[in-house]
Amino acid sequence: MQLIYRGVKYKTSDQAIPLAESGTKGFYRGAQWIGHNVAEPVPQPNHVLCWRGVTYQTNGVPVAATALRTTATPSGLPQRKRNSLAEAHRHAILKTLERRLQVARSQGNENLISLLEEEWQQFA
């Protein structure tokens, strides 16, 4: 059958699917309606897919567990880079802690000063 969509002509492949009556009958807008089911199940494609490192198949059959990569680090960064990031993070925390300690001393809040000094000792 030849069809036209937005001026483009194309032919469809006539793939008739054998149907069988389902026994369901009724009326729709005054016309009699008879339900049909597919006589034979249509084979579904089987695709092996991967989502966030987990492999699965579209037909529901489980796939063998994917082996974890042992060569890569958990964060994907080299050890030297992670160490420098951790040191920068530690430095930022200590800088913030020092600023909070200065404010507590300027306000004369002895309770907060003792808590912040205790926190400082934990980082040192």
Image (spheres, rainbow, N blue to C red):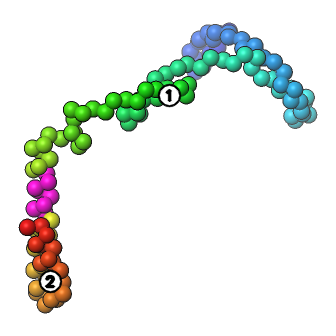
Between 1 and 20, the one lying in front of the other is: 20
Q: Specify the quadrant of the image occupied by residue 41.
A: top right
Q: Name the amino acid type tagged 1.
A: Pro
Give the Cα distance between marks 2 and 1: 58 Å
Look at the image and say whether residue 87 sits in the magenta stretch. Answer: yes
Residue 45 image point, x, y percent:
55, 19
Type of amino acid under label 2: Ser
Q: Residue at x 10, y 72 (%)?
A: 121
Q: Is residue 61 left or right of residue 31?
A: left
The secondary element bearing badge 2 is classed as helix
Quarter of the picture containing the N terminus is: top right
Residue 119 colored in magenta in the image: no
Seen in the picture, residue 115 relative to 80 is either above or below; the reply is below
Residue 108 left/right relative to 54: left
Res. 55 visible in picture: yes
Q: Residue 88 appears at what percent x and percent y?
A: 11, 56
> Which SS class for mark 1?
loop
* Residue 49 visible at all: no
Q: Residues within 10 Å of mark 1 (few under 14, many from 20)?
A: few
Residue at point 15% right, 65% down?
A: 93
In the rendered image, the vertical position of residue 19 relative to residue 34, given as above or below:
above
Q: Main secondary structure of the magenta part?
A: helix
Q: Quadrant of the C terminus?
A: bottom left
Q: Which span of residues is magenta-colored?
A: 85-92
Q: In the image, which disc is placed on residue 114?
A: 2
Q: Quadrant of residue 26?
A: top right
Please name the residue that numbered disc 1 is placed on.
Answer: 62
* On screen, residue 90 above or below 52: below
Question: Camera-side residue: 74 or 13?
Answer: 74
Residue 33 in the image, given as x and y percentages of width and height: 87, 28
Q: Which mark is residue 81?
A: none
Between 42 and 13, the residue placed more toward the observer is: 42
